[in-house]
Image (cartoon, helix red, strand yellow):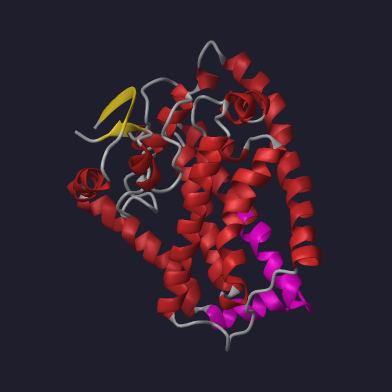
Amino acid sequence: MRLTTNLKKVSIAYILKHNTHEIYKDIVPRLISLLLLIGLVTVPFYYSSHIIPMWMQFFSSKIVASSLTFPVSAGVTYIIGNSIYVAIYYLEIPFFEQYKVTKKPWPWRTSARAEFFEKLKFTLPMLAFNNYVVVPCVTLIVVYVYRYEAKTTIEEMPSFLVHLLQICFMVLCEDFMSYWGHRSIHHPYLYKNIHYIHHKHNETLSFAAEICHPIEFVLLDILPLMTGPLILGKQAHFLTVAIYCVFRLTETMEGHSGYEFPWAITRFIPLSCTTEYHGFHHLTNKGNFATFFLIWDSICGTNQTYYE
């Protein structure tokens, strides 16, 4: 794979051919990736008779139970996932370090250490504000204004095929919204006043995935994540939505982690972005707007990373 700072339109067929080659050249870790993905989608489904009553015992309102699916599943995933990544960063175990996207040391191990921690003093409070102020406000709007409601009983749990197709639909909706939102916010005015905060960390770190201006957090993080579930409404079950949220947040952390783990949960999926792909966007602030699939970058010619 070659990196270039020149945007190049590459056909989806071309990308798919070489992306498929990348998937199957290291088949063992890719199979681990596939097993992790299958486990995430199937295990909660088949244990739904235990999970659903456990969740619903806390709520008398279906609307509240449905709406809290977003912040709880995303928040728990973000906290657990980043705790694991921070431990990996700190310990620098050779087995994991071999998968670093770049050979450069982590910023806290260089002479730029003071500058890095100065950035954290600015960006971490914004991360806290987004998660503990913005998220509750959006949740209240979803509950009391939009009155979002999903299915909440064991009897309403769909067939596995419908469950799987709904997750795919939600992922595609999020991918479409994220690409065009991300591309739009790189307009010079929006970048200068809003998006520059996310790019303060030009190195990719898992916890930096949600560090952004509150307006961007709503329009590019929360809204795309919720688009699919809001469209499906009562056609989807809250457990299906929760699995989708966990999957999407896991992929976001992987994409910003700075590691190209071959067993990462999306690495078996054709046309999926890699950590290197998104990391190159952070290095150049140009192109590679996709967050999940390579489809829209390929169609619109905004690829910087392509296969030879």
> On the picture, is 207 further left or further right than 268?
right
Name the residue located 53 percent from the left edge and 38 percent from the top edge.
182
Quarter location, residue 118: top right
Q: Please say whether residue 195 is visible from this viewpoint.
A: yes
Q: Quadrant of the C terminus?
A: top left
Where's residue 305, x and y in %?
32, 32
Quarter of the rendering occupied by the N terminus = top left
Tell whether position 81 is magenta. Answer: no
Nearer-the-camera pick, 22 or 105: 22
Name which residue lies at 20% across and 51% down: 24
Answer left or right for 170 relative to 150: left
Residue 135 vs residue 273: left or right?
Answer: right
Q: How many marks?
A: 0
Q: Which residues are magenta?
A: 48-74
- Residue 184: x and y, percent? 55, 36
Q: Where is 144 relative to 194, above or below?
A: below
Quarter of the rendering containing residue 211: top right
Which residue is depicted at the point 45% across and 83% down?
159
Position of residue 72 measured from the top left corner of the image (x, y, whole percent): 67, 60
Residue 250, can we see it? no
Using residue 249 as the reference point, say whether residue 67 is left or right of it: right
Q: Residue at x 68, y 73 (%)?
A: 149
